[in-house]
Image (cartoon, helix red, strand yellow):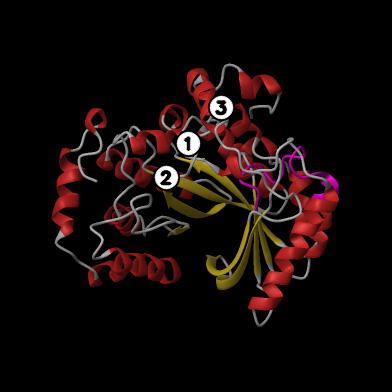
Amino acid sequence: MSQPSPEVYEQGKGMDAHNRAMREIRARNDASYDPREPTRVWLDEDNTPDGFVDSLTIILNTGGCRWARAGGCTMCGYVAESVEGGSVAHEDLTAQVETCLDHEADNADEPADLVKIYTSGSFLDEREVSAETRRAIADTFADRDRIVVESLPDFVDREKVTDFVDRGLETDVAVGLETATDRVRHDCVNKYFDFADFEGACAEARAAGGAVKAYLLMKPPFLSEGEAIADMKQSVRRCGAVEGCHTVSMNPTNVQRHTMVEELFHAGGYRPPWLWSVCEVLESTTDVDAIVVSDPVGHGSDRGAHNCGDCDDRVQRAIKDFDERQDPSVFDQVSCDCERTWEAAVDRERGYSVPLTR
């Protein structure tokens, strides 16, 4: 597996020119954030190997993803919401967790079975979250059934995963793989690692008694609609074939602030994927030996996955229903005249002339 040294993040990996451009774009951001307040927290439901369960999702505000600080992924603006300075103290991170627990107590009848903890970077990177904080969080949620923690594959090792497994938690590491195609990950997403590194992370998690939840990115920049669909179908299948990867979450790209995707979007060079494309991938991969889900963020808006505007909410409900039941027949119950426009875009759009439609 690749090693998280400073050289990996500054030289020889990813597009150096892109990284320089992204550092300039993000320098325009003048917002500041309280290190004792989480970035976000919300209650939801998730499909897991244990069934469809209530979940508590926490996005901790850390010093940010080290790859993003070097330049980072074309679509990710989360580093713009991170605390300046590169690190957050143990006491501040535990205060963030307490705030999230207070939110849960105020808005839920009982504690959620599933807790998902993200940092918009790598929870298992000890520059973001120290070993002391990681173990304290494991203790805090030891009474829950399952926990998901986010990490790049570099930082996944069995000792860190064991901190959670040893406390009786079913433990999943959420890895932002984005695509199983190395060239697309390198050139369209500007992510430095290879699919083999993802396989290595799955092996490390499995050796500790944990597992992996793969996150894929539907339609990164520079792909046509048809290319994006084909890439996702192949990627879902390759992930499902990796031992230890039990869930694949396909996330349609949304236009986040202070990103290369936003620059392209404003210049007329990018359209988020159609919701019909999400349905197409989900419907065609139901035979994969994994739970396959999608949660389009900002659906129906210009910056999120959308169709024509009239059918967006109905299609989103069908996707949500599929996430719970894994039954592709839900897509037979939604239709719209704009499907013909989508089909034309899939058939005619080319990478050198995207987007064909808005």
- Residue 146 covered by magenta stretch: no
Residue that sits furthest to the bottom in the current view: 109
How many labels, in total?
3
Q: Are marks 2 and 1 in contact (CB under 8 Å)?
A: yes
Q: Secondary structure at mark 3?
A: helix
| Amino acid carrying mark 3 in the image | Arg
Q: Which residue is mark 2?
A: 255
x and y percent of residue 116 in the render?
A: 64, 59
Residue 201 position within the rendered picture, expressed as x and y whole percent measured from the top left: 63, 41
Q: Is residue 353 above or below residue 75?
A: above
Q: Earlier in the sequence, mark 1 or mark 3?
A: 3
Does residue 269 appear left or right of residue 242 in this picture? left
**Distance (Cα) linking label 2 and label 1:** 8 Å
Q: Which residue is mark 1?
A: 259
Q: Secondary structure at mark 1?
A: loop
Q: Which residues are magenta?
A: 118-133
The structure residue drawn at horizontal position 46% and vertical position 46%, both measured from the top left corner, is: 216
Q: Position of residue 215 (x, y in %)?
A: 51, 48
